[in-house]
Image: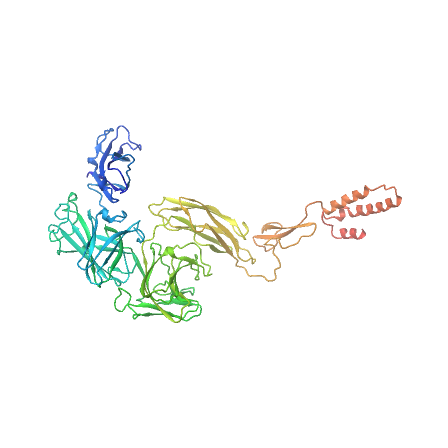
Amino acid sequence: ADPWFNVWVLNQSDATVDQYTLEITIREDLNGDGWTDGSEDSFRLDTTFANASFDDQWTLLSAPVSSFVNLGTGGDGQFNGNLDEIVVVVAGVVGGSGSVVELDLDQFAFTSGGPLISSLTVFDDMEHGDPFGNGWFAFGGAVGGGGINPNSTDLPPVDGGAFSLETGWGSGGTPGFYGGFGRTFPTDLTATDHFNFWINPNAGQDYTLEINLQEDDNSDGAANAADDDEFQYNCVVSPAGPCAISGGGWQQISIPLADFFDDNSFFTGGNGVLDAVPVASGGNGQLINVVIAIIGNSGSDVNFRTDYWAFSDGPLATPTLLIDDFENGLPSGTDGDGNPIGFFTFSDGSPIGIALTDAPPAPVPGSNSGNNVLAMTGNVTAFAGFVHAFENAAVDTWVPQDWSAYQGLSFWLYGHNSGTTLFVDVIDNRNPGSSRDDAERFSVTLTDNFSGWQFFELPFSSFTRKEIGNGAPNDGFTLTQVHGWALGTLNTPGEITYYVDDAALYGVAEIPELAVTFAAAEYEIEEGATGQITVKLNRSLNSDDPAQVSIDYFTEPATATPGLEYTPVSGTLTFVNGGPSELTFALETFDDTKWEGTERVILRLTNPIDIGAGFALQAAAAIIDNDAYDPNLIDDFERGTALLTPGEITVLETMVLNAGDAQAIPGQDTLETFLRIAPAAGAAPRAVLLNSRDAVAGLRPTGNSYADRKLNDVLDQLDHLLLDSNWHNDYYFSPGAGKQAMHDL
């Protein structure tokens, strides 16, 4: 089949030329030398764009390669080699001096036998900020009216860009047809089966959006009531939904095209089939208009913001994951380490209790009859609340969940407008190998300044770390090992009951920049064991990441002595795309028989290659002593000589002896620290005496016979004292002889 070349082109509306030609040249490489020479072909596709198409909308440019112009650079005139390069040139510009062309290009692709079929077709992302200048229209109804405008401040959490579309309608309280709005924009719905849009409806309103898809069914490029089809879906927006919840914040709605019914109330022609495919692709015409009629159900005003209308293969609706709907009781128990799991309460001593009820003061909006909610009742002085620590089916194991793919946590909460401060905690990861609740907490506060049910969406980006003194890791809000969640309240004005339902995860998390970090702030290793130090990525490597990334590691001394208590290590950890996102290196420690307390080693990461520096590039290894404390031990000199006072002619220092050394003591550890008493710097005592003896001899003759006799007596005594037989060495006397010599002196 003839290959087709495809590229998406967006001409920006702020371009000022009248028209231009986009020249796209493809060059082949027949011999595999990596470039195009005189015996190989080049072909060019020319497409002219006029200013009418400068509309900030993506357009798919597709053409069979056989339709490209042969530039005659050599070769056989056929594109039958490897692609060497694609060259894009803006040429044939028509416009005034200083005028500009602004365009975006995306997804260069070759397909076999036909154009690229996109599974996502954006009808309008509202980024033009000028609805009436881009095919939008509005019209009044039988009982009311309204209009549309751009909005640059209220935007959805995903695909929001810089603008949304806002609309407001009213009838003075009369239910019925208020009017409507829509857009004319011919669109190919090939390979799509859902219509999607974002909506943020004001609270307390009740209305129906009649969404109408008007298609060309006779290939004339227009939508006419007598010739063409219209398909309708009724989206009910109210405090209970079901299509969208008024006051529920931004919601993404995905409607299967199969759920649109053929509406013959206005459009009476067509074939009764939603088949919006252009003639060039074998169909009978494209989608021409999307029109929304506003029907007031209660007479309330209608106000909402909307954005990112798109057709897709499969729904685009923001994924959700239900965490707790309270329809299966409140299981509780303990894990194998005695930690409470399931549902349990906490407090400062204030009374607090939780229970299920199917009779809250009002039903949860959109809920069915008999729906259970959790009721939390307390009269709180300082703080109290409940925790759901995630459990297994047997309620005997604490089981974490991975929330990292989601944007935030949502739930329904019944308020009393009491002014009380409530808080929501996410109980994140624990230390590796932990047997207790040392999980890291991240928290956000709410104010009870509303009455009745209110729906909350709390993005994880709004949570901050809460220190509760439990030795938790401090490695950031990873969300990969969430151990539970909690709802609590600070001081209440008296006994109060809060109701909560349908805690769920919502949204799609942005993929964070790839980073590497220690998995824990401290790693405990029993002395004599070899510990494994875990280093982890903040997420798995994906197709957009390098084939491999790396980080260097090394140890530094802290209170543990290198070579005596552990073996220093250094090296490189390399993470491979498709491999594990956690790697380890070993740290060997040595056992002994003495109590020394916990000693620590500094661990460091450095030199990240093709990866960002994560939350913690420094950690510690704690060498846990396994020996009993000896209250009778005065000093074993393991901690040096800082607390010892040397004599005037001595220096104190420690030395380490191996068990195999000649001076080792029986039964010592493999390595033992000793105190060594050494002479101070300077002359030895015997040398000092010799110098003194010579100084005395140098005093003679004095000229006084009596003085000379006395000096001779001193010299005799010094000579006797300095006899070799009296000295063990230049520092110490011989036992006995030295003592007698001093006595004689």
Q: Residue furthest right?
A: 705
Q: Nearer the viewer, residue 661 or 168?
A: 168
Q: Residue at x 31, y 49 (%)?
A: 162
Q: How far across and down, in percent of the image, does residue 708 sit?
A: 86, 44
Q: Give the image's coloring scheme.
A: rainbow
Q: Is residue 225 visible?
A: yes
Q: Residue furthest front?
A: 172
With 527 as the anchor, is 117 left or right in this view? left
Task: Find residue 663 and report its horizontal and vertical position in percent.
Answer: 62, 50
Q: Is residue 617 left or right of residue 73?
A: right
Q: Where 47 sits versus 374, above or below?
A: above
Image vertical order of residue 74 relative to residue 506, above or below: above
Counting from the top left corner in percent of width and height, residue 65 is at 21, 36
Task: Please identify the quadrant where the N terminus is shown.
Answer: top left
Residue 694 in which image quadrant: top right
| Displayed quadrant of residue 36 | top left
Asked whether the viewer can see residue 324, the reply is: no
* Residue 233 relative to residue 452: left or right: left
How many numbered circles does the render carry?
Answer: 0
Q: Is residue 240 left or right of residue 578?
A: left
As displayed, is residue 317 above or below residue 116?
below
Residue 311, horizontal then vertical, whole percent: 23, 50
